[in-house]
Image (cartoon, rainbow, N blue to C red):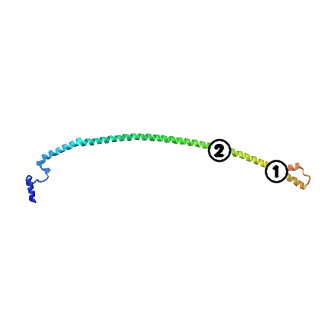
Amino acid sequence: MASSATDSDAAYGGEQAVGMPQLDFDTWASQIFWAALALILLYQILAKKIMPRIAGALEDRHHAIADDLDSAAALKVRAEEAQGSYQKALADAKARANEIAEKNRADLNAQIEEANAKAEAEISARTAEGEERINAIRAEATANAREVAGETARAIVDKLAPGSADPSAISAAVERALAARGMV
């Protein structure tokens, strides 16, 4: 195998290279030429094709962000206006509700006062009617008591002293007795 390695070396120049081929000073001019050519081509490709696309994408992104920020600012203004009108509507609704509640309270108080006045009038009327009935009953009772007392007194006088009963004297005695008891 060793002889085949030497045969291949002899076929390609005869001598075996030592170390890395990039460090061989005999091929540096060629390597520098090809490296420069590759860098120039790479720069041209980057400058003409890739960099404009990247710059365009960055510019589009910048415009999109700016448009989004403008839209967000406009929406923020609209949201603040909507919140202001909501707060105003809420305050108006609360004021209206308070007005309605106050009006209802006043109406209810008026109705309660009216009902109380009617109830008091009815109670006064019934009280007066009851007092009239009581007075009528009391007058009737007093009249009945006079009559019963008079008849009883006459019956007692007739039993004790028959024929000596003076109706006017019996009536006067009955009136004195009823007045003493507070029934007249």
Q: Is residue 18 left or right of residue 89?
A: left
Q: Position of residue 39 (x, y in %)?
A: 19, 44
The image position of residue 94, as x and y in percent, is: 52, 42
Farthest residue, direction bottom: 1
Q: Quadrant of residue 7?
A: bottom left
Q: Residue at x 43, y 41 (%)?
A: 80
**Where's residue 115, x and y in %?**
65, 44
The answer to which image quadrant residue 72 occupies is top left
Q: What residue type is disc 2 on?
A: Ala
- 177 left or right of 22? right
* Residue 46 in the image: above or below residue 163: above
Residue annotated with mark 1: 144
Q: Is residue 67 above or below residue 163?
A: above
Q: For mark 2, does the 10 Å Cα neighbourhood hold few (<14), some (14 to 19), or many (20 or more) residues? A: few
**Circles 1, 2 touching at the beta carbon (< 8 Å):** no
Q: First in sequence: mark 1 or mark 2?
A: 2
Q: Residue at x 28, y 41 (%)?
A: 56
Q: Which mark is residue 115?
A: 2
Q: Secondary structure under badge 2?
A: helix
Q: Quadrant of the N terminus?
A: bottom left
The residue that appears at 46% across and 40% down in the rendered structure is 85
Measure the alpha-carbon separation of dots 1 and 2. Answer: 42 Å
The amino acid pointed to by label 1 is Asn
- Secondary structure of the residue carrying tag 1 is helix
Which residue appears at 78% of the width and 49% of the height?
138
Q: Nearer the viewer, residue 167 or 180?
A: 167
Residue 12, disc = none
